[in-house]
Image (cartoon, rainbow, N blue to C red):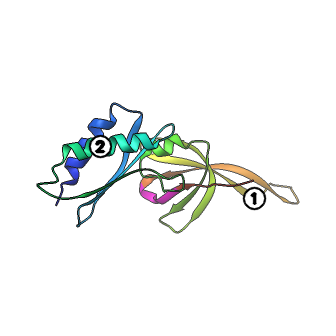
């Protein structure tokens, strides 16, 4: 079986010379290698093809046969790296928490430890007759989050 660490090293070495970064690599039991990349801008087909050719050149099919897929992280794919959180600050997101809560709001900030989501909550102010919408920031450590995805709306 092909070593995942070897593929990570090959991919990261190549990606250092580009604007792209590694999101995930999986190696299946049948040696299906799936490499997922992203960029702070856009990932083009040429970026995927170049990385695919680089990985192919570094592996020996004669020693061990494999199938290789290199793709960009889809806009509706869950975030897998802190850099993806940072890239999407200001975007509307859906966050599923391990406690079962599902939040929708704006990704306000993100760092190495946690992400902050701004959610709209209806609250009744003291002396008010009706509830008003209040925006509040909620901080969640990545260990509390099952997944976070962009919300795509067509208006």
Indicate yes or no whether the magenta region holds residue 110.
Answer: no
Q: Position of residue 12 (x, y in %)?
A: 29, 40
Residue 5, horizontal then vertical, whole percent: 21, 50
Query: Could you say where residue 43 lies in the image, as x and y percent from the top left?
Result: 47, 42
Q: Which mark is residue 94?
A: none
Q: Secondary structure at mark 1?
A: strand
Foreground pick, 94 / 8? 8
- Up-down relation of residue 22 to residue 93 (above or below): above
Q: Secondary structure at mark 2?
A: helix
Q: Residue at position x 52%, y 69% from top? A: 100
Spot the residue most to the right.
129
Residue at image location 41% in from the left, 51% down from the top: 71
Q: Residues within 10 Å of mark 1 (few under 14, many from 20)?
A: few
What percent of the width, then of the height, locates residue 104?
A: 63, 57
Residue tagged 1: 122
Q: Residue at x 32, y 46 (%)?
A: 52
How many labels were placed on the picture? 2
Q: Residue under circle 2?
A: 53
Q: Which of labels 2 and 1 is toward the front?
A: 2
* Mark positioned earlier in the residue sequence (2 or 1): 2
Q: Can you name the residue that lies furthest to the front here?
A: 62
| Disc 2/disc 1 C-alpha distance (Å) | 53 Å
Compared to residue 90, the image places residue 2 above or below, namely below
Magenta stretch in the rendered image: 143-148
């Amino acid at each position: 079986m092909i070593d995942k660490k070897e593929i990570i090293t090959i991919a990261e070495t190549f990606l250092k010379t580009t604007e792209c970064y590694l999101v995930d690599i999986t190696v299946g039991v049948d040696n299906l290698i799936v490499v997922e990349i992203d960029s702070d801008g856009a990932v083009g087909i040429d970026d995927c093809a170049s990385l695919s050719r680089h990985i192919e050149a570094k592996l020996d099919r004669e020693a061990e046969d494999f199938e290789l897929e290199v793709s960009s992280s889809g806009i509706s794919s869950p975030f897998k790296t802190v850099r993806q959180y940072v890239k999407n600050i200001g975007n509307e997101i859906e966050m599923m928490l391990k406690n079962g809560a599902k939040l929708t709001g704006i990704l306000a900030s993100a760092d190495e430890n946690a992400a902050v989501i701004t959610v709209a909550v209806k609250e009744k102010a003291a002396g008010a007759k009706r509830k008003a919408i209040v925006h509040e920031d909620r901080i969640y450590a990545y260990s509390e989050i099952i997944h976070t995805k962009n919300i795509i709306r067509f208006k």
